[in-house]
Each structure stands twice: as C-alpha cells, then as structure tokens.
Amino acid sequence: MITNLPPLVVMGVSGCGKSTVGALLGERLGLPFFDGDDFHPPANKAKMASGTPLNDEDRAPWLAEIGAALATPSDGGGTRIIACSALKRSYRDLLRSYAPDLVFIHLAGEAATISGRISGRAHEYMPSSLLASQLATLEPLGTDEAHVPVNILGDPGLLVDVIVRELELS
C-alpha cells in the first residue's frame, strides 16, 4: 500500500475518463475522490451547455476552488484525488500554488477515440462540440511538472493498475 501520497489531479480533455478512472483510483488507494465538474459555478455550466468554451477568466475561480480543496480539505482529511481538465500550464501552475507537491495523472488518447466516447454518453452540460476547443487548449506537461502519463486505451481498472505502479515508483 502506498503511504504519504501527494494530492492527485486526474487530468485531460472531456471524455478521456477522468471521473471513471479517478473514482476507481480513489477506491483502490482508499482516498476521497471529487469530480472537478462539481466545483463549477452555475454560470460556467450554462456557458458550456450553450456550446461556448470557457475562457481563462471563467476558469480562474473554478481552479482556485479546486486548488483550495487540494490544499486544505474541508473534511480534515489528508490526500485527495480531484478530476480536473487542467488543460494549460498556467492552470496547473495555479493548482500547484495551492498544493506544491501535486501530481497530475494525465489521461491522453487520440481525438477520434475520445470523440467516440463523448458521442456515446450524455453529459449534464459538456456537448461534444467543445472537444475541439479543449484539444486546441491542451498544453503538454513539462518535464518539471510531476505527472504520470496514461494512454486511455484499455479497461479503466487496468489503467488504475498502471497509475498505482507508477505512483509506487515515484
């Protein structure tokens, strides 16, 4: 069993499996999991539901809420896992300003694979039309950013196995 884990953010574009993998990872590690979607204010959800991508100004308060939750859990607990797209370096920098030891679990895959997943699901406010804007916004993680890259092909349980092995090695 891994002990003393830093906060973890399961990141990637919409449809890559953040919520599914994050929840399974939380179960495996015995850590609380939170979906970043739950931190969005109603205005952000309405904007996305209308097919309009969020801009940096829209995302800043949302990212600050997530950062605060990573740094100072309101339930008094320790390490937690939060799903958050964290598409830009500046967004990840903001999250790290709250939790400097944060590790990103980057779920990545081909656009066609992700598009197929999105078309086969119903989401409260994230239409498939926004995938292109998310892919265009996504900035690769730098070598100085603590992260575990994970290809989304495969069963979510197997992806969690890969993540746990990588976390054990770090």
Image (cartoon, rainbow, N blue to C red):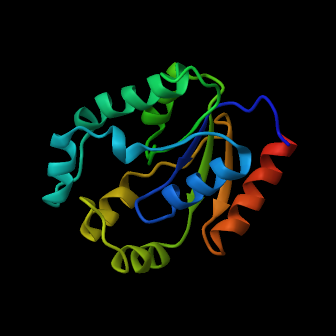
Image quadrant holding the C terminus, namely top right
- Residue 45: % across, % down: 21, 49
Q: Pick out the residue farthest to the front.
A: 75
Can you say whether 147 is above or below 162 in the image? above
Q: Residue at position x 63%, y 57% from top?
A: 24
Can you say whether 154 is above or below 12 in the image? below
Can you say whether 114 is above or below 91 in the image? below
| Residue 98 visible in this rendered orientation of the protein | yes
| Residue 94 visible in this rendered orientation of the protein | no
- Residue 44: % across, % down: 21, 43
Image quadrant holding the N terminus, namely top right
- Residue 132: % across, % down: 32, 65
Which picture quadrant has residue 58?
Answer: top left
Can you say whether 26 is above or below 129 in the image? above
Q: Is residue 147 left or right of residue 76?
A: right
Q: In this view, does 144 lie to the left or right of 92?
A: right
Q: Residue at position x 37%, y 51% from top?
A: 137
Q: Residue at position x 51%, y 20% from top?
A: 98
- Residue 4: % across, % down: 78, 28
How many dots with numbers? 0
Q: In this view, does 123 lie to the left or right of 117?
A: left
Of residue 132 and residue 6, the one placed in the foreground of this image is 6
